[in-house]
Image (cartoon, rainbow, N blue to C red):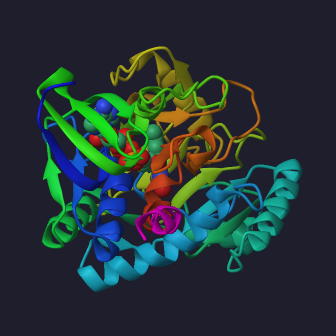
Amino acid sequence: MAHMERHPFNITIIGAGVVGLAIAEELSRHFDSILLLEKNESQGQETSSRNSEVIHAGIYYPEGSLKASLCVEGRKLLYEACEKRGIPHKRIGKLIVATGPDEEEALLGLQAKAQNNGVDDMLFLSGRVVHSLEPDVIASAGLLSPSTGIIDSHSLMRALLAGSTGNGVTAVFRSAVTGARFDGSRYDLEVNNGEYLVSSRVVVNSAGLQSDRLAALPGIDIDREGYRLKLCKGSYFSATPQPRLRHLVYPVPTPKHEGLGVHATLDLAGRVRFGPDVEYVDAIDYRVDEGKRDAFHASILTYLPLLVKESLNPDMSGIRPKLQGPGEDIRDFVIREESRLGLPGWVNLIGIESPGLTACLAIAKQVAHLIEPLME
Ligand SMILES: Cc1cc2nc3c(=O)[nH]c(=O)nc-3n(C[C@H](O)[C@H](O)[C@H](O)COP(=O)(O)OP(=O)(O)OC[C@H]3O[C@@H](n4cnc5c(N)ncnc54)[C@H](O)[C@@H]3O)c2cc1C
């Protein structure tokens, strides 16, 4: 690193997923000299384009957590942005369905939890009303979340990138950050193993599945800080012929909240997809295992009894960057400026799993807030 010229920037953002892009646009409203570095050829080729594209209401997350507050705030900001900027989206609503008395209890618990998180529009429905909304779904009762919707995440990311570059952000692709060193006032970032160097006052690590390894580069002990990620794959199956559904339909979630159950999602083209399941993995491999068909079919049958097993086809998958391992309690998003670790101006975003897409605009505001005092 010693003798090469360094390209100077005030702020460098690592990762052009939906979160890095939202941060770039938000920061570009307040600060200048911003660089966005992405290792792939274009934006959003990883988790941000391998998800359910659901705008979550914010029902399930622990009260007082960033997941809860940033989801509720982010959802409102996202609907506003979609309307203002012509980003395709639809408030189609979500039904959580119970199969019997135990799950009806759980629905009431969810309604109360949602209320505490500021989601006050949830409606408890009898099985008969659920049936009138979704004739092919069986349920003893249901909870309707009218503020849940779907979004075209690719359009969102294009809009955020255009907004950022329009405000002067330099976005550079095919550029992986491979080294980072703090000299007491600025960070030297090595790109593509030394192809070029960047010098930056502030660094925002929003590198998704690699964010723990990025945090280790300037010397953070990621095990001591509890930053090591566990990869948790979620696979989807589609169905031909398509089931008739008008809402997103979810079973009651599992207690540890590892995933939201094999639910039925709809995209803006009206295509139904089932998933994602929950599978901790050691490596990133997006192939969908056909052998899961039986398990998918069994879970879907609990609410969609007419679905024929042979109609299910392996579809896509995505990988959640989770901080908690299998069976462990839910962990919150890490969004921290690391002065306490002797790294002022280094901001880590780690464990940004669901509802990261919904929350992206609120996360971006939070990051702007964290770095504001450093930019004076
Ligand atoms: C199966 C699944 C379903 C989901 N469903 C939903 C949902 O319905 N609603 C919702 O709100 N959220 C959902 N999520 C969560 C949501 O997709 C994520 O929270 C969000 O996409 C995270 O965005 P990100 O920008 O942090 O990460 P990413 O999209 O992973 O972006 C990180 C970027 O950093 C880049 N990068 C990594 N290392 C480097 C490096 N060294 N140098 C340069 N660049 C680097 C990567 O190439 C990547 O482009 C889901 C997630 C999964 C896996």
Specify start and end residues of the magenta stretch as a single range. Answer: 366-376
Q: Residue 300 is drawn in which quadrant?
A: top right
Q: Position of residue 54 (x, y in %)?
A: 45, 59
Q: Residue 53 is drawn in which quadrant?
A: bottom left
Which secondary structure dominates the residues rendered in magenta? helix
**Residue 113 in view (yes/no):** yes
Q: Nearer the viewer, residue 347 or 274?
A: 347
Q: Is residue 227 left or right of residue 200?
A: right
Q: Nearer the viewer, residue 116 or 130?
A: 116
Whether the magenta-drawn stretch holds residue 372 is answered as yes
Above/below status of 371 relative to 193: below
Above/below status of 122 relative to 21: below
Q: Is residue 268 left or right of residue 67?
A: left
Q: Residue at x 61, y 33 (%)?
A: 323
Above/below status of 199 relative to 278: below
Question: Which quadrant does the N terminus fall into?
Answer: top left
Q: Residue at x 35, y 70 (%)?
A: 26
**Residue 314 in view (yes/no):** no
Q: Is residue 177 left or right of residue 242?
A: left
Q: Quadrant of ligand 1?
A: top left
Q: Residue 290 is drawn in which quadrant?
A: top left
Q: Is residue 367 left or right of residue 125?
A: left
Question: Which quadrant does the C terminus fall into?
Answer: bottom left
Q: Residue furthest bottom?
A: 84
Q: Nearer the viewer, residue 266 or 301?
A: 266
